């Protein structure tokens, strides 16, 4: 057996993370933090006014979280531990939440029954349906109000629909549509062409939502942006196809060790099949990893091996790179190729977001700080009168086992032996309930604005240029933490 030399101490790098540094305050010309522009990117073509992204985890992001994130100017990535149909339905739900024009409004035939209309409205959670005949010619509208006192469920929709319609032509602006809705005191404005064919629908509800969320992340059609995660084995190509046709704006190839041949091959396959689709890949923690995924076709690189609050990867496997060093390394690629780096995991305090961005990240992915919000799919738990939500690592024991049960369609029974064989690289815990995600994101974004203004930076690009980190000692970190009284 030949002896190979152990890694040399002389060439060994030192890795640092968020609490090892602070940003040195710089002379600033910024009079108000409101004038700081926090815009960042998640991928080459996905720009976010608020560069905060909710993690693709089953206790963090499904449609409700993704909607709240996009309304706040950020982005949510739907997790992949659902059937293909379920994940695609989550994406479709986000895409239908807000739009300038609903291109495919829910419709019903005049020959359908009142009972069918009632069921359809209930299942889609809408207050009205457009009634269309042959060739999608608009004939009327049927609303909850029309059905309210109508007991005969077998009557045709034609008998109850209202056919006095206020309509508009394609191309009407949102402002003009708002005026028509107000003038006629109506909630829905069907859009028809010269021949009376239905082309879409504008609703008062959508206009109100748009006014409420001026910073929202939207696609060119005014629909909220949403991303969706895929794996690299099994049905990942079918899943990608279903997610893209449901309207996903970006796919995220999400694997714990992203710098591996099968991930690189999967990224290349997806990009070859859908060259125009935005594709983010990860996770990596080195420049080489970021470079190889970019060369395979990724439009954004997710960076983070083991920094997450529920991660035990570093403890179990001994592998990982402290997060600030990982970002600094990977972000060299952004400078070269323009591919954004997303810092994923490890944000404990709002200031960590500023540090991640200052180190070169273009956006920051967050799990634990969002897992405690109303919109997360995690279970609510009350202990001693205090509300918590369940938050678990996707490689934790329970997440791994429940995934196997879901994949079997609920038939699989886990026994002790199987549970013992799982080598978990994550843990589960409870996080304090924090209220609405929109408000949490608002607070986090406020911290970023403030941090950028301390560095004298009006934009993220300026932050990258101007930021100066200072290494600090554990005592200096202790000094940084709020404390009610200083002992000695
Ligand atoms: P935070 O710190 O925001 O981190 O809670 C969220 C990120 O953690 C990663 N993640 C895991 N990492 N084992 C790991 O080593 C796991 O079980 C696990 N689950 C999630 C992931 O990158 C997420 O965005």
Image (spheres, rainbow, N blue to C red):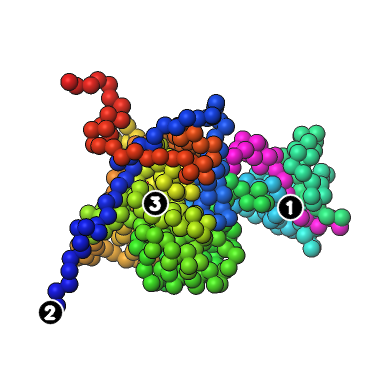
Which quadrant does the C terminus fall into?
A: top left
Of the two numbered discs 3 and 1 on the same chain, state the one appearing first in sequence: 1
Please state which of the two labelled residues, at mark 1 or mark 2, is closer to the viewer: 2
Answer above or below: position of 245 versus 223: below
Q: Which residue is identified by label 1?
A: 200
Q: Nearer the viewer, residue 389 or 134?
A: 389
- Disc 2 on helix, strand or loop? loop
Residue 54 in sight here: no
Q: Residue at x 73, y 58 (%)?
A: 109
- Disc 1 on helix, strand or loop? strand
Q: Position of residue 234 (x, y in %)?
A: 42, 72
Extreme-right residue of the structure: 194
Which quadrant does the N terminus fall into?
A: bottom left
Is residue 206 rendered magenta in the image? yes
What is the crowding at mark 2: few (fewer than 14 residues within 10 Å), some, or many (at least 20)?
A: few
Q: Nearer the viewer, residue 460 or 13?
A: 13
Q: Position of residue 373 (x, y in %)?
A: 42, 39
Position of 252 with respect to 151 (left or right) is left
Is residue 78 rendered magenta in the image? no
Q: Which residue is identified by label 3?
A: 327
Q: Nearer the viewer, residue 90 or 229?
A: 229
Q: Position of residue 232 (x, y in %)?
A: 42, 68
Of the two numbered discs 1 and 2 on the same chain, state the one appearing first in sequence: 2
Q: Which mark is residue 1?
A: 2
Question: Residues in magenta?
Answer: 195-216
Q: Position of residue 97 (x, y in %)?
A: 60, 47
Disc 3 CB within 8 Å of nearest ligand 1 atom: no
Q: Find residue 409 and report its image quarter.
A: bottom left
Gap in angstroms between the C-alphas marked 3 and 2: 39 Å
Please state which of the two labelled residues, at mark 3 or mark 1, is closer to the viewer: 3
Gap in angstroms between the C-alphas marked 1 and 2: 73 Å
Of the two numbered discs 3 and 2 on the same chain, state the one appearing first in sequence: 2
């Amino acid at each position: 057996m030949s002896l190979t030399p152990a890694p040399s101490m002389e060439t060994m790098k030192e890795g640092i993370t968020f609490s090892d540094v602070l940003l040195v305050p710089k002379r600033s010309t910024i009079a108000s933090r409101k004038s700081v522009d926090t815009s960042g990117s998640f991928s080459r073509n996905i720009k976010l006014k608020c560069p905060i992204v909710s993690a693709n985890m089953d206790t963090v992001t499904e449609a409700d979280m993704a909607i709240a994130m996009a309304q706040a100017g950020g982005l949510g990535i739907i997790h992949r531990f659902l059937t293909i149909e379920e994940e695609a339905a989550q994406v479709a739900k986000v895409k239908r939440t807000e739009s300038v024009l609903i291109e495919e409004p829910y419709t019903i035939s005049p020959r359908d029954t009142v009972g069918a209309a009632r069921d359809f409205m209930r299942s889609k959670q809408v207050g009205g349906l457009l009634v269309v005949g042959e060739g999608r010619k608009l004939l009327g509208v049927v609303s909850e109000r029309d059905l309210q006192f109508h007991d005969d469920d077998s009557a045709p929709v034609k008998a109850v629909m209202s056919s006095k319609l206020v309509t508009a032509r394609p191309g009407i602006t949102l402002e003009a549509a708002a005026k028509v809705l107000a003038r006629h005191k109506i909630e829905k404005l069907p859009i028809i062409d010269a021949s009376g064919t239905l082309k879409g629908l504008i609703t008062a509800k959508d206009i109100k939502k748009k006014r409420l969320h001026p910073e929202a992340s939207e696609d060119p059609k005014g629909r909220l942006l949403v991303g969706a995660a895929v794996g690299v084995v099994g049905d990942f190509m079918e899943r990608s196809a279903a997610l893209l046709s449901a309207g996903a704006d970006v796919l995220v190839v999400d694997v714990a060790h992203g710098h591996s041949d099968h991930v690189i091959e999967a990224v290349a396959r997806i990009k070859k099949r859908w060259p125009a689709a935005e594709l983010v890949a990860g996770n990596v923690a080195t420049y080489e990893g970021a470079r190889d995924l970019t060369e395979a076709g990724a439009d954004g690189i997710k960076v983070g091996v083991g920094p997450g609050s529920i991660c035990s990867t570093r403890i179990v496997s001994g592998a990982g790179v402290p997060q600030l060093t990982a970002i600094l390394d990977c972000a060299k690629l952004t400078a070269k190729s323009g591919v954004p780096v997303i810092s994923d995991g490890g944000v404990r305090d709002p200031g960590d977001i500023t540090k991640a961005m200052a180190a070169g990240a273009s956006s920051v992915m967050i799990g634990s700080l969002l897992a405690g919000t109303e919109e997360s799919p995690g279970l609510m738990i009350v202990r001693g009168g205090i509300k918590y939500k369940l938050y678990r690592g996707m490689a934790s024991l329970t997440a791994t086992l429940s995934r196997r049960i879901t994949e079997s369609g609920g038939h699989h029974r886990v026994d002790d032996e199987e549970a013992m064989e799982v080598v978990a690289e994550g843990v589960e815990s409870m996080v304090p309930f924090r209220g609405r995600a929109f408000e949490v994101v608002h607070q986090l974004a406020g911290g970023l604005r403030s941090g950028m203004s301390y560095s004298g930076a009006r934009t993220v690009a300026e932050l990258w240029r101007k930021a100066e980190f200072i290494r600090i000692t554990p005592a200096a970190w202790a000094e940084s933490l709020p404390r009610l009284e200083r002992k000695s």
